[in-house]
Image: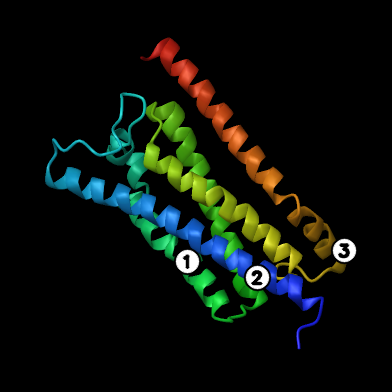
Amino acid sequence: MTTSAETPLRRRRIGFAWFSIVAGIVGWFASFELLTEYIKTLQEPTHAPNCNISKLVTCGPNMDSWQGSLFGFSNTIIGVTAFTIPILIGAAILAGAHFARWFWRLYCLGLLGGIVFITWLQYQSFYSLGTLCPWCMVVWTAMIPLWWVTLAKGGADGDLVVNESAIRRLTGFASWAWVAILLHFVIVAAVAQLAVDWLLEFRL
């Protein structure tokens, strides 16, 4: 028999599982598109990637730059690999899996690393390469909510901390996670707009 306290927790777990799957699929698809276009450019140097819309809105320079292969191989391989993790986690939760606190801490640490990485890539794209990479932006659209929602869920469910006061604060934050997501997107959009204004003024 399910108690009244368990029902909201179960609903939150199921909702998070589906969100994790959808966000993972979106990020994986965008990463896969970038990877396939990257492979095509290696096979045929004159190939025009499907994300090359204009001189400004393009992904070609991003894929060809050293920033696009920071660790010696294409960043797209990292994306295709990494975005399978939230998909598998979501599917496992739907199947009834429960993960230990150490697992959630490691997962959130990995997501934080992903956020730091894409933030660096955003700066490089906007100000060093002077591009707005369409598929990259789809990856960001998946990654940013994935980080904040997972952090909120982990905090509210006591998966990240054991201190009761910390859990209460994180539970309060969980209901406002959408604000953090919106603010994050607004900041990225503002930085991108400043970059576009600068590019139009001095480089294009």
Against 11, residue 118 (above or below) is above
Instruction: Tell me the quarter of the picture where residue 152 sits.
Output: bottom right
* Percent position of residue 166, x then y: 82, 62
Name which of mark 1 and mark 2 comes first in the sequence.
2
> In 3D space, how far apart are the residues under numbered discs 3 and 1 (Cα atoms)?
31 Å
Q: Which residue lies under the disc numbered 1?
A: 87
Query: Does the rendering let one see residue 71?
Result: no
Numbered tag placed on residue 13 in the rendering: 2
Name which of mark 3 and mark 1 comes first in the sequence.
1
Q: Which residue lies under the disc numbered 3?
A: 165
Which residue appears at 49% of the width and 34% of the height?
A: 123
Query: Does the rendering let one see residue 191?
Result: yes
Name of the residue lying farthest toward the right: 165
Q: Residues within 10 Å of mark 1 (few under 14, many from 20)?
A: many
Mark 3 falls on what kind of element? helix
Numbered tag placed on residue 192 in the rendering: none
